[in-house]
Amino acid sequence: MLCVLFALLASAALAAESAKPEKVREIFVPYEDLSTLMEGNSQRVFLTRQEYDDLLAKAKKKPPEIPAPQGALLLAAEYDGTIEEGRVRLSGAIDLEVLEEGLHALPLDMSGVGVRRAAFVVPASAGSAPAGITNPSAPIARDAKGQTILFVEGIGRHRLLLEMVAPLQTSAAQQSLTFRLPTPAAARLRLVVPGNVEVKSGAKVVSRTLDEAAGVTRFELLLPKEQLSLVMSLNNRMLRQQRVVVARSVLVDEITSAYERLHTTVSFDVLHGAADRFRLALPEGFEPTEVLSPLLSRWAVATVDNQRVLEIVLREPSTETVVLNVSATRTPARLQDWTMPQLTPLDMAGQVAVVGLIVEDQLSAEGIESQGLVPVDNRVLTAALPETVFRAEPGAPRVRPVATYYAPLAKFALQAGFRQPPPRLQVTTNVLLVLDDQGHHVRGGFALLPQIEKLFAVHFTAPAGWNVTQVTAADGKPLAVERYDAPQGESLIHVRLPQGIPPGEVTSISFQAESVPPDWLGQWPERTVAFPRFVVENTTRDTGAVAIRADDDLLVRPNELAGLDPLDDKDKENYGLAGVESNLAYRYEVQPYAATVHVTRTQPTITARTFSFLQIAPEGLTAHYEILYDIRQARARQLTLRLPKATPTSLSIRGAEGATVKDYTSEERDDERRWTALLAEPVNGVVRLAVDFQQPLPDNESKESSLPLARADGVAYQSAVVAVEGNAELDITVKTDARTVDVGELVAAQYAVGKRLLGVFESVGPPQAVQVDVDRRPGYGLPPAIVQRAELDTVLSADGTALTGVRYLLRTKAAFLEVRLPAGSELWSAYLDGQPVAPQRDGDRLLLDLPASAQNAMRDLQVIYQTPLTSVVMLNRVATEAPTLWLRNDRDAQAGEVPTADVTWNLLLPEGHRLVRSSGTVYTQQLETPRSPIWNALGGLFFAAGGVPGLLGGRAREAASRAKDWAASPACQLSDEVQSDMAPSSALMTPSEGLPREESIERLAELSKKEERMPQSEAESQPEAAKDSPPADATADPFGATQDPFGAPRPSSPKPAAGQPADQPAAPPPPQRPAAGEEVAQVA
């Protein structure tokens, strides 16, 4: 009691506390501190008192309740159906939920069913109360449109139980249901159907279970939203009990040597009921390979009562005619004691059949016997052959119909035997034999017609000496070939045919062969040729045609024929020779045949024109021949020519203008050598052969020597042209009886004659003999050393001393060189190739050692010496000599003088002196016409005394002026050249790098301590205008100088020097030894 009291008091206290109003505290904040309060939190909002009270009042109000979209709705549905006789019984449980108070009208989408009972039950999950029927009858009605309406009230879940029936429509081949049920989001149907049944259409099958013990099929289906139209197959047990089927068959047995195949076409006519499967009894040893039908679902082979049965299941029962094609195979085929196999339909009310026998072409049927069969025409079988007969595998043999029967009853018998005859092969052969220069060539072919069996290889023989080069198929592709030696020397050719040739089809193969009989490549005029036979082995018939064609100027005519008849052009097409050009053509009907022909070679007609070019030189005779052959009527394979026997055995023969020489040989005949040139290809028309060789001349002078002339051999007509060329070192005289012709007759030759042509001669027929007399001109040996140029510079002093600098440019390879100075000379210095040397001296002779030079053999020698002469007072003759060079091949050997080719001598006179006359081995053209010395002396006296202002005043001044000019004139230039002009001062050679001319002269002047003015260099003595002007063109010098090293130009014609005395020639002859010459000058 106390506990209950305390509990009541506690509950009353809690109720009192919950009833107390909630206190709301308000804090008043001055406006001055409002900013502090507002800055602390950004979520605060400043409101007036009125706005705050209105917002608080709205917060205390309850939100209005929103009604549900629908007052009641269906949640799930489960249906169970059982197929009975003529109807389906359905039961369903529909879960629904009421969301609002009141009575609700819930539409149920139902049609095609009759509702037997409707009740509400409490779902097991609704509360603690057990599930059960709460309302034995649920209020259901129909509206004006006939739609079923369920009335329900009370918030919460409800379950509606329905019991319904629907009609079942059954036809001969199927059964169907059509109705509509309420289908919420989760709805399914479980259906139980008697027998083994398949759902054809109308709903998606979740599962199918066949309960063989109960004899029913259980389905779980997904209901569609729209009306359900479920189509199912009939019960198979019921179908077998009610159907009536008859069969019409076409039974064809295909027999080959490898297998036996049974082709069956069965038409099942369903007379009553519907059929969804058929059975056929298989014969012993046959295995089904193909089963075809538009309604076929599957097939299998089962054994029933020791009998192999072929079971065919259709996709659906059919009340129409069902056509079935079956093919079964047995290997190997039974060719002996054969009986007709039967593919018998089972469970038939009746059956008839057309029985046919087709056999491979290579098999023959024997002893055919039948029981229970009626023979009919084979055309009936051809029109009714099963479809599987036409779908033969690649490579299957060809078959033909043998017998056809009609079987009115299910039981019949047919016996026969089969024999395979030996294979047969028919061949049509064509062979074309081509004869040419290279040998014999055959192009042939075989048209093969096999019978009985397919042909995969063929053998044919080739005659001895023949080589089969290739074998090709009809499309041109090469075939594999194997060669074997036959016992009689022939060749056996084995040809493989990869695709094979079916019996009854004609296929062609082609072959090519070649042969070169002995001595065929030689030069024979005629010979006999046997026609080769190419024969296919193991043939039952061999017919064909042969043809012969001669090429390359060959003629052919028949000799002996056996088993051959002439063949005209119209019949060539029958043997594969249509359009083939031939000289002879024959045909044969049986093997063997034989033919020999006579072959003649056409000889060409050749004319020739020969050109002989003979060049005679000291080293020997150079011969060049050009022979132009004009070939007519036939082609030539080789050309011949003849040369004297004394000509070399080794020479060069080449072809031109379309001819190529392959090889050439020679043979001696009498006094001639016959050359044969073998051409690479036979030619006709104009052909040119060129022959070249060289041979030495006799050592002594030859008189009336015959020149070797070429002539063409084996020609009908020829002409010859001979051209003889000489040499500057030989005196040649030509003697011949041939007529002399112009050099223009050589225009047809390719060879171009030189400038020393001695004559051109022509003759008709073989060339006329040409003889020559050859005299050799005397020869001159070259000196071992030679001075190419020498330059001397001589400075004369008034006291009778001459200072000379000489420069030699010489070519020699000698080791020693002797220099002989003029008598009484004193050597100052010597340079060799720009380097000072110390010669060995013996009196006026100097011995120089010439070291070997790796550069050019040109050596540069410079010598400076002083020679005493006659003093010059007023007018005196001064004689100077040039040094000479002597060659010593050995230190102790005798010396020989070295010749000099060119000398230039520059003479510098004392101041106030001039050259008035010159003589010796060198000459100059720089002399002026001399004036009277007396007159010059008188002029000088008058001028020195002040002159006379009368008659002689002007003359004296002129003479004094000329004397002043003479004193300042340049050096006189002396040369040993025959033709020379007065050279201006600008043309004098500037001393080269190796000869320090002015420096040496200045050194000599200082040593002699003379007070004479040294001559200026040419560059200093030239006026300013001459210095600025461009240098004159100089002749190229082998020593590298850009102008004449010695500066003296060579005039085109000799001119006498001005003031030259009458006894001095204007152009003296060149001296014999210029370097050893001397100069005699008269100096004033």
Image (cartoon, rainbow, N blue to C red):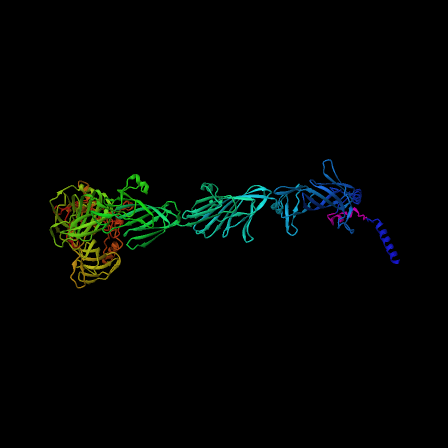
Most extreme residue toward the front is 371
Find residue 126 and report its horizontal and vertical position in percent. 76, 49
Query: In this view of the protein, which residue sits in the foreground, 1077 or 781?
Result: 781
Most extreme residue toward the bottom is 892
Q: Which residue is drawn at 23% across and 59% down?
A: 829
Find residue 228 and report its horizontal and vertical position in percent. 66, 42
Q: Is residue 721 magenta?
A: no
Q: Say left or right for 719 vs 334.
A: left
Query: In this view of the protein, which residue sits in the foreground, 776 or 434?
Result: 434
Q: Can residue 806 be seen in this view?
A: no
Q: Is residue 463 above or below residue 226?
A: below
Q: Is residue 470 visible?
A: yes
Find residue 736 and report its horizontal and vertical position in percent. 11, 45
Query: In this view of the protein, which residue sits in the foreground, 357 or 30?
Result: 357
Magenta-tinted stretch: 26-43
Q: Does the magenta stretch include residue 40?
A: yes
Q: Say left or right for 84 vs 935.
A: right
Query: In this view of the protein, which residue sits in the foreground, 856 or 342?
Result: 342
Give the quadrant of residue 859: bottom left
